[in-house]
Amino acid sequence: MKIRNPNKSSYEGLQKDIRKLKTPKIDVWLNQYPDKIYTIVMDIPEFTCICPKTGLPDFADIKIEYSPGKYCVELKSLKMYTIFFRNIGIFHEHVVNKIMEDFVKVVSPRWVKITGVFNPRGGIQTTVLREYKK
């Protein structure tokens, strides 16, 4: 009989393979103004994921600011992508980094800044910011 450690979350151990996490596809569409420098800002104020330590929900406002090159992100697919995280146990820092890696891989923007403002947990609010530039 295997005894469960009461101090260990059922999500523990998932963080080591977070970069390999299979996420939904983010779709893009062809930018008709690739020669122009402009900024697109998307705010996702109802982002949720799971705390990998407690199994409780985490809530955040994720903001993505980017300058498109050849492609722009398709919003419905981005919505479906972010909804995927609702059942994933993931640290705040990993959320922002995973979104950045997936976003850059598909959209290939000139630059992008992703900011995650996570609601207080244990009295501490966490903000994670990552920037990318070609």
Image (cartoon, grey):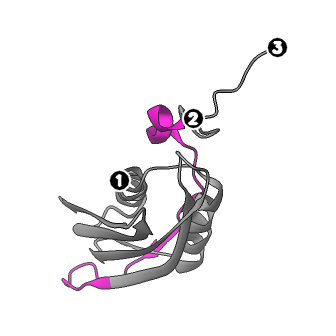
Queried whether the magenta region covers residue 19, the answer comes back as yes
State how far apart marks 3 and 1 are (Cα).
Answer: 36 Å
What residue range appears in magenta? 14-40
Asked if residue 29 shows in the view, the reply is yes
Residue 62 placement, left or right of 112: right
Q: Position of residue 107 (x, y in %)?
A: 38, 64
Element marked by disc 1: helix
Q: Nearer the viewer, residue 16 or 118?
A: 118
Quarter of image, res 118: bottom left
Q: In the rendered structure, are the residues bearing label 3 and label 1 in contact, judged by CB atoms less than 8 Å apart?
A: no
Q: Position of residue 44 (x, y in %)?
A: 47, 79
Q: Nearer the viewer, residue 95 or 65?
A: 95
Residue type at numbered disc 1? Glu
Q: Which mark lies nearer to you, 2 or 1?
A: 2
Of callouts 2 and 1, which one flags the residue occurring earlier in the amino acid sequence?
A: 2
What's the mark number on residue 1?
3
Q: Residue at x 57, y 35 (%)?
A: 7
